[in-house]
Image (cartoon, helix red, strand yellow):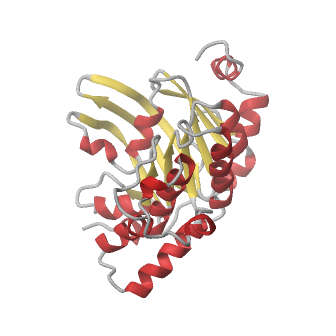
Amino acid sequence: MVNLMEMPPTVSNPGRATAPAAETEAAENMIEIDKIDFAYGANKVLHGIDLKVPARAVTAFIGPSGCGKTTLLRCLNRMNDLVDGAQITSGSIRIQGVDINAPGLDVVDLRRRVGMVFQKSNPFPKSIYDNIAYGLRIAGITKRSRIDEAVEKSLRAAALWDEVKDRLNVSGYGLSGGQQQRLCIARALAVEPEIILMDEPCSALDPIATAKVEELIRQLKVNYTIVIVTHNMQQAGRVSDHTAFFYLGRLIEFSDTRKIFSNPAQRQTEDYITGRFG
């Protein structure tokens, strides 16, 4: 069985899309996506995606609905394996140099190390404490003191501890929408991932809750590689270091976020950013 963490990190040149800024070129790349084609049955939805995702930074995937952002995101922890007929038809995805679609790779270990936060907050029908402890118990951790420590650490990392520390036995459903989303982030953090995938994590939240989640994302990038799908251009500008623009299943441009929004290299990118289509 191949363990994702057996290989050391690799440093690569950026992808073949429009070159990122110099600091991206020098950065360690956590994820390397190489010529990925992906299809749902006979419907090809990703075409030759080349992209290098830098470590310990926030990379935003932007583009109009149906352009392949979420499909690519779900390729990164093999969530698409759960969809009948969905498959990568060519190319590879490597995390820290390991091909995540290689035969024998431990998919459970992959999904532990590549956590995911979904568009709609989805706490389990359990207490706040048990929501966080669930993944640890699945991983075989039973010692109460260790679970207690991990619960507190994860809730603190998700900026939720001070709000819930006196009601850990209350159902996660009793939290507000923004708190539920931060609980889901804490649940992902509890199993100590290296990468956090976020699919429109603020789309169902009010502006105040959105601001809290965005601030949390900025704090988490110190220790985690974060990839976020968002339709909100302002949000991409606020939280991401690098931005990839997709259109009709193709990667049009990838660069430093400031450059994408101030001086994009491709006309299609400029047209989308400025609202000419989307």
Q: Residue at x 33, y 48 (%)?
A: 78
Front residue of 217 and 22: 217
Front residue of 38 and 120: 120
Residue furthest toward the top? 276
Q: Residue 88: which quarter of the image?
A: top left
Query: Quadrant where the N terminus lies?
Result: bottom left
Whether residue 19 can be seen here: no
Q: Residue 71: which quarter of the image?
A: top left
Is 68 placed left or right of 105 in the picture? right
Number of numbered markers:
0
Query: Quadrant where the C terminus lies?
Result: top right
In the image, is residue 23 above or below residue 96?
A: above
Q: Residue 92: which quarter of the image?
A: top left
**Residue 234 image point, x, y percent:** 70, 33
Front residue of 192 and 52: 192
Q: Residue at x 79, y 30 (%)?
A: 262
Whether residue 120 can be seen here: yes
**Residue 189 image point, x, y percent:** 49, 64
Is 215 placed left or right of 37 in the picture? right
Residue furthest toward the right? 262
**Residue 200 image point, x, y percent:** 52, 39
Q: Residue at x 30, y 62 (%)?
A: 108
